């Protein structure tokens, strides 16, 4: 019997494993980098061991440090979670060599599937259909589009779609750099990119006695930057014959490598309906909760039991209903899904029950508490919100309803994108594919219509909160002005109003009546519709939540802007905190650049972000160099635009 488990991970997945361990009476040990010293997973563990440093490469990716931490804390077993070292065969061997129980497949099975190119060879020999990779040097225009993909790891890192042959070399270099930073392995390969395909996977669970379960399908087609955003089980609209084939191939994949524990076989289903194997993830998936909800199981508990040598029943439980999961990220979808680190002041989802195999209708898995910080060093996942219901329609509606009413205060997030996605006709009809966001991102990230009304509510709550008197009748009736900048789109709102004995006078809001207000709650009547807006201020940042008109974030602007805050035209500012990892070859002051030309690359939250020239002109300043740490808003370079000479 396992008495104590060290989780070689952080954040949401560490908290998820700890929850099951507590339910089973197993002691827990956390590891943490310096940037995570106050993190929730550290607070929840029975014991925690520091890994000196902050970057993943010097902490969570250092297998020898993690094994030493397990031994020092007296842990008996190691659970790798997902990401980091979870699919590293050498780490699994080191855990076993130290006399610890490895909660996962054998090192040999991990090794067989660790390289996506090697896994395809094994699957092809087992009769599972695969797509052959392309030799990078031999790729021609006729092969486009192609996908550059990291051979090891996952999570969308080290992946680039190439539609222009001239950009292939840059994509290869960028993917290698990102893969090396995220997984410690810079091997990449090239394969044809299937437009309009669906990403479907099968959950596998196998014991040491030869029993292999296939726990249904999941659809993970909605992705940004090749990383999943919304997942569901079962995958909607699959013909029964295709579903059975996918189950069979997943079981064949597991048996081909003597697999034990939880794993996932991933397939791409093109528009022609002829699927092929992508890869096998030899670990728990981020989206495992949807399978847990549908099958009424705890996959972490089953992982632990398999690791203890228990046998699985001959057949898995029967599925029931439908489950949908949305990943809530601290990121700006309208800015290329750029991560947005910072303090999370409030994270609350209404009607969320305690997660577990019995299954609350609404479940939240998170590694964040109010007051925690989203670090620049790691993935910006805030929470996974999962809805389970008898039908897909009910599950989708329940999830959208919960996300719309959630309180998410702090960094910019993808919450509005998630709500709009769940209500988009293509998604509700189950007709989505991996190109969904490429087609619909602009409409899904448009500023919400009630933004000005929300800014008015922010101004009224601010005035009421500052009033030393007991009610609106005591507030002076002089004209008031308050300015806000909407986040993240940057729209500025100047709110002018006056409070009189007869009510609110606001020239820009004809017909709007003020019914009630406090420093945190404003009730307005607009066009005969009564709206309640909840206001929360954190310094100069203001969040306005309303159930039916969306949620809004503003920055209160100073009355007299600081002229020193202005930047000269053509300035390239860091869009996020991070590290400069590359500068374009030959880039120097005085060089001519063209609009859109990549100039330098920042690494933040384990992803590479390209900084391009804002216009054609001359580089007149360069303040970036590889290895330099920069804060958000730091001046990286200046491009002086070329003045066109009249013909």
Image: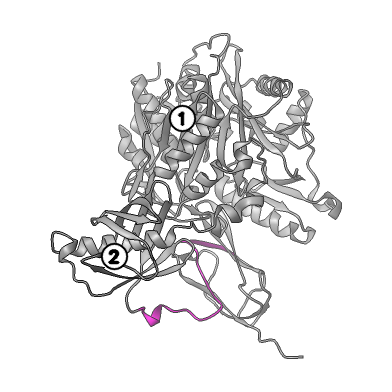
Nearer-the-camera pick, 637 or 346: 346
Horizontal and vertical percent for residue 84?
52, 41
Image-quadrant location for residue 132: top right
User: Which residue position holds label 1?
Assistant: 79
Is residue 102 toward the left or the right of residue 595 in the image?
A: left
Locate the C terminus and report the quarter of the image it occupies.
Answer: bottom right
Image-quadrant location for residue 562: bottom left
Q: Is residue 147 above or below residue 362?
A: below
Q: Is residue 536 above or below residue 238?
A: below
Q: Which segment did they paint magenta?
A: 561-582
Check disc 2 and report its element: helix, strand or loop: strand
Going from the N terminus, do you reach mark 2 or mark 1 first? 1
Horizontal and vertical percent for residue 445?
54, 55
Residue 573: numbered disc: none
Nearer-the-camera pick, 446 or 473: 473
User: Which residue position holds label 2?
Assistant: 504
Image-quadrant location for residue 71: top left
Is residue 401 toward the left or the right of residue 237 in the image?
A: left
């Amino acid at each position: 019997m396992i008495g104590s488990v060290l989780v070689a991970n952080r954040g949401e997945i560490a908290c998820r494993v700890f929850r099951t361990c507590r339910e089973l009476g197993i002691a827990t040990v956390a590891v943490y980098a310096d940037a995570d010293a106050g993190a929730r997973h550290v607070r929840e563990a029975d014991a925690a061991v520091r890994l000196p440093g902050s970057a993943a490469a010097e902490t969570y990716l250092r297998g020898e440090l993690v094994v030493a931490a397990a031994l020092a804390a007296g842990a008996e077993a190691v659970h790798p979670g997902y990401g980091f070292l979870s699919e590293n065969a050498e780490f699994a061997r080191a855990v076993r060599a130290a006399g610890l129980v490895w909660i996962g497949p054998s090192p040999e099975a991990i090794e067989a599937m660790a390289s996506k190119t090697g896994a395809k060879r094994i699957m092809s020999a087992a009769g599972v259909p695969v797509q052959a990779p392309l030799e990078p040097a031999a790729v021609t225009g006729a092969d486009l589009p192609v996908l550059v993909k990291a051979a090891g790891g996952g999570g969308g890192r080290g992946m680039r779609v190439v539609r222009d042959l001239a950009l292939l070399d840059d994509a290869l270099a960028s993917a290698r750099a990102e893969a090396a930073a995220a997984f410690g392995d810079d091997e990449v390969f090239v394969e044809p990119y299937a437009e309009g395909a669906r990403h479907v996977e099968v959950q596998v669970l196998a014991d040491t006695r030869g029993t292999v379960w296939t726990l249904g399908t999941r659809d993970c087609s909605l992705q940004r930057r090749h990383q999943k955003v919304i997942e569901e089980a079962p995958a909607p609209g699959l013909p029964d014959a295709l579903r059975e084939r996918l189950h069979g191939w997943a079981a064949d994949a597991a048996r081909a490598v003597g697999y034990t524990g939880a794993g996932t076989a991933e397939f791409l289903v093109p528009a022609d309906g002829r699927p092929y194997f992508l890869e096998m993830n030899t670990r728990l998936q981020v989206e495992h909760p949807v399978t847990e909800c549908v099958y009424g199981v705890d996959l972490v508990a089953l992982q632990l039991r398999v690791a203890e040598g228990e046998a699985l029943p001959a057949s898995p439980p029967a599925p029931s209903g439908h489950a949908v999961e949305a990943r809530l990220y601290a990121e700006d979808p309208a800015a290329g899904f750029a991560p947005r680190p910072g303090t999370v002041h409030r994270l609350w989802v209404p009607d969320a029950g305690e997660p577990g195999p019995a299954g609350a209708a609404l479940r939240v898995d998170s590694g964040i508490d109010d007051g925690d910080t989203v670090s620049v060093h790691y993935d910006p996942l805030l929470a996974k919100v999962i809805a389970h219901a008898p039908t897909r329609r009910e599950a989708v509606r329940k999830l959208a309803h919960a996300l719309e009413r959630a309180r998410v205060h702090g960094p910019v997030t993808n919450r509005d994108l998630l709500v709009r996605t769940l209500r988009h006709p293509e998604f509700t009809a189950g007709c989505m594919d991996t190109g969904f966001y490429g087609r619909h991102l602009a409409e899904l990230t448009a500023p919400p219509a009630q933004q000005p009304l929300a800014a008015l509510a922010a101004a009224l709550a601010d005035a009421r909160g500052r009033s030393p008197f007991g009610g609106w009748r005591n507030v002076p009736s002089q004209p008031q002005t308050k300015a806000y900048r909407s986040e993240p789109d940057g729209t500025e709102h100047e709110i002018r109003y006056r409070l009189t004995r007869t009510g609110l006078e606001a020239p820009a809001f004809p017909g709007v009546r003020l019914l009630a207000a406090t420093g945190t709650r404003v009730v307005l009547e607009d066009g005969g519709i009564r709206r309640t807006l909840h206001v929360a201020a954190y310094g100069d940042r203001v969040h306005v939540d309303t159930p039916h008109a969306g949620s809004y974030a503003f920055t209160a602007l100073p009355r007299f802007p600081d002229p020193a805050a202005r930047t000269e035209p053509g300035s390239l500012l860091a869009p996020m905190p991070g590290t400069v990892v590359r500068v374009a070859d030959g880039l120097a002051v005085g060089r001519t650049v063209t609009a859109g030309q990549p100039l330098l690359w920042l690494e933040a939250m384990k992803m590479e972000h390209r900084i391009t020239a804002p216009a054609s002109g001359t580089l007149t300043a360069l303040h970036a160099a590889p290895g330099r740490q920069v804060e958000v808003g730091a001046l990286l370079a200046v491009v002086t635009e070329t003045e066109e000479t009249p013909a």
